Amino acid sequence: MIMEKFKKQKSIDSFCQKNEPKEFSDYSLAKFIQKNKKSSVLFAKQGRMEKFSTESLNFHYIKSANQPNFQSLDGFVNFKKRIYHKQKRNTGRDLYLEIQERYGDWRNYATDLLRGSVQGVSVARMWNVSIVGSLIFGMFLMTFIYRYLGPNAAANSNRNKANKEMQQILGDSAEKPNEDEKNYEDYVSKIMNDYKDDADSEKKLKENILEMVKGTPMEKMAPFIAKQDRIVAAFLVAIAKKESSWGVHVPVLNGEDCYNYWGYRGIREKMGTGGHTCFDSPKDAVETVAKRVDFLVNSEKRNTPEKLKVWKCGYDCSWDDPSAVRKWINDVDYYFKKFDKFAEE
């Protein structure tokens, strides 16, 4: 009794509760959807394909008016075959024919030009292309002008003239093939004769010097003096006679001959008596003193005993005895003139 009473009682809150239908879950269906929700299906001529790949992007689907409606099961089952379309490629010939047909009438060309486009090519791009073409043509034209009408053409013409003249010259020289050889032989012969004359002159000068200084210490210097210029050799012999009597009265160092027969005063490591220079050998003495004499004769033009008195008293002889200076000049001049007599013989 009490239980029946309890069953009949209802809570007030029960009237506000929403009675929702219980959800029905199908595990196998959910698993199938989860597995295939990202897959694609292609309905091709060969049939239904779950795995496929397109060869190019030119294939695309065309929406049909009778495209199946997937909102209902009837639309899913009853659908018509899909239509596939491949985009046609316009070849160069097709494009050419299309342009030719398009602009066969000048009015179409004018219309497209005013509109700012000619088969997809803008006026600005056409302008740029024309500028580039003009530059290329101009460069080609300038190269052509420079090559055939510019300085190179004149140079080639002058070169051809020069070649012709050279051929003429060669032709003339061919008539006298031995003329240059003859001149060369004459030149060599002249050099050899001059060398022979110099050798003969040196030999003769050596004999003359030996004839003068024979029996004196200066005799051993004769071969080296004979190699010098004739006027320098004459001064070497004449000054040595005046200053040392050809090596009889000379400065010494530690009792040894200094080979200074000219009174030469040059600062060296070895210095003899009286502040005179000591030389290492007769050859060293002749070559050193000859350089100084050659400088005075050729550079300062002191080619006479009168002008060469600087050897006696320097560039200012006011301090020296004039009579001694005059005697020095006369004694040197006496032996200097003997070389002129040797030259006349």
Image (cartoon, rainbow, N blue to C red):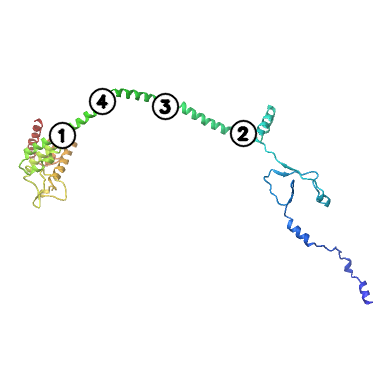
Secondary structure found at label 4: helix
Residue that mark 2 sits on: 126
Q: Can I make out residue 272 in this image?
A: yes
Residue that mark 1 sits on: 198
Frontmost residue, 277 versus 177: 177
22 relative to 56, above or below: below
Residue, far front: 46
Disc nearer the start of the sequence (2/1): 2
Secondary structure found at label 1: helix
Are the residues tagged 3 and 2 within 8 Å (C-beta)? Answer: no
154 relative to 200, above or below: above
* Residue at position x 57%, y 33% in the image: 131
How many C-alpha atoms fall within 10 Å of the one at disc 2: few (<14), some, or many (≥20)? few
How many C-alpha atoms fall within 10 Å of the one at disc 1: few (<14), some, or many (≥20)? few
Disc nearer the start of the sequence (4/3): 3
Q: Of tags 4 and 3, which is closer to the observer?
A: 4
Q: Which mark is residue 179?
A: 4
Residue 207 image offset from top left, x and y in percent = 9, 37
The quarter of the image holding the N terminus is bottom right
Figure quadrant of residue 63: top right
Figure quadrant of residue 126: top right
